Image (cartoon, rainbow, N blue to C red):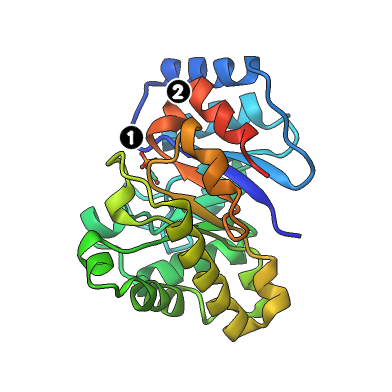
């Protein structure tokens, strides 16, 4: 059965002290995760060890990196390998966030290589996809997202694809306060699942968690997560406020 996931994306925010404070506040607020639910915190690289140490003991709570490199090791100054992440206990990596695609020119092919190296090293990619406003206005979001999935993921085996978490994030809804309606989210999530079903079969597609990202907050999480193909959220801004993120965790189905 696929997991329901609340994933925090801190992006390039907070200091070590503020990050630690935020985690302390989250721990102190009442929340619960059942067997099929997970909370994941994608924190900046310098805080991974602190966050893992603090949260690693809690059941179904994980720390994620926000990126990794596509090479095993070597002369790549400033980059971080999956082996390094693994060596400090990290099990998840966010890949292909639209900010990385836009500001760092990450292509579908480059992301395919990152997906491969993660899976080879037992790290779960949280693979982000999603269209810009102009694509949505042209009603081409399905074709756009299909291309992202095909070029970065469809070379994987059925066994491997079930180890990937998908985050559908319409770029027009990220950090803008504009959220896709729950109907819009359900429609494209169902479409994404249908693409996996067409490629790998319905049973495999049913096992893949598809998160929604784009201005998720306490006030809209329950409605979004109640949709049958929305398996939780990848949350930016609201994940920096303890009460907001805990409410989002508690909104998981
Ligand atoms: C994100 O960073 O992936 C995101 C969805 O941000 P926000 O929740 O702030 O829109």
Decide if residue 122 is on the left or right side of residue 172.
right
Decide if residue 70 is on the left or right side of residue 176.
right
Crowd tier of the residue under label 2, counting other residues whose Cα lies within 10 Å: few below 14, some 14–19, many 20 or above: some
* Residue 99 seen by the camera: no
Label 1, label 2: how many angstroms apart (C-alpha)?
15 Å
Identify the image quadrant of residue 18. Answer: top left
Q: Quadrant of the C terminus?
A: top right
Which residue is tagged 1?
12
Which residue is tagged 2?
241
* Residue 169 seen by the camera: yes
Mark closest to the chain's N terminus, 1 or 2? 1
Q: Residue furthest right?
A: 35
Residue under the point 43% across and 63% down: 71
Decide if residue 45 is on the left or right side of residue 186.
left
Which secondary structure, mark 2?
Answer: loop
Counting from the top left corner in percent of width and height, residue 198 is at 58, 85
Front residue of 181 and 160: 181
Quadrant of the picture in which ligand 1 is shown: top left
Q: Quadrant of the N terminus?
A: bottom right
Residue under the point 30% across and 55% down: 171
Q: Is residue 211 above or below residue 138?
A: above
Which secondary structure, mark 1?
Answer: loop
Identify the image quadrant of residue 52. Answer: top right
């Amino acid at each position: 059965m696929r997991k329901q996931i609340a994933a925090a994306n801190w992006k390039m925010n907070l200091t070590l002290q503020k990050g630690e404070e935020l985690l302390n506040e989250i721990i102190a607020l009442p929340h619960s995760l059942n067997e099929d639910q997970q909370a994941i915190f994608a924190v900046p690289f310098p805080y991974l060890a602190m966050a893992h140490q603090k949260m690693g003991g809690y059941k179904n709570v994980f720390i994620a990196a926000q990126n990794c490199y596509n090479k095993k090791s070597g002369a790549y100054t400033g980059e971080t390998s999956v082996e390094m992440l693994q060596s400090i206990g990290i099990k998840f990596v966010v890949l292909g966030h639209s900010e990385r695609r836009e500001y760092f020119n990450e292509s579908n092919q480059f992301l395919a290589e990152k997906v491969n190296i993660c899976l080879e090293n037992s790290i779960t990619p949280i693979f982000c996809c999603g269209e810009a406003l102009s694509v949505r206005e042209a009603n081409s979001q399905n074709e756009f997202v299909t291309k992202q999935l095909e070029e970065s993921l469809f070379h994987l085996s059925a066994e491997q694809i079930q180890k990937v978490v998908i985050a559908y994030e319409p770029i027009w809804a990220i950090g803008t306060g504009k959220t896709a309606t729950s109907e819009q989210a359900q429609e494209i999530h169902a479409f994404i699942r249908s693409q996996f079903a067409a490629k790998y079969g319905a049973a495999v597609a049913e096992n893949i968690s598809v998160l929604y990202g784009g201005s998720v907050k306490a006030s809209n999480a329950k409605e979004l997560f109640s949709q049958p193909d929305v398996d939780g959220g990848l949350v930016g801004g609201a994940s920096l406020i303890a009460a907001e993120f805990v409410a989002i965790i508690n909104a998981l189905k």
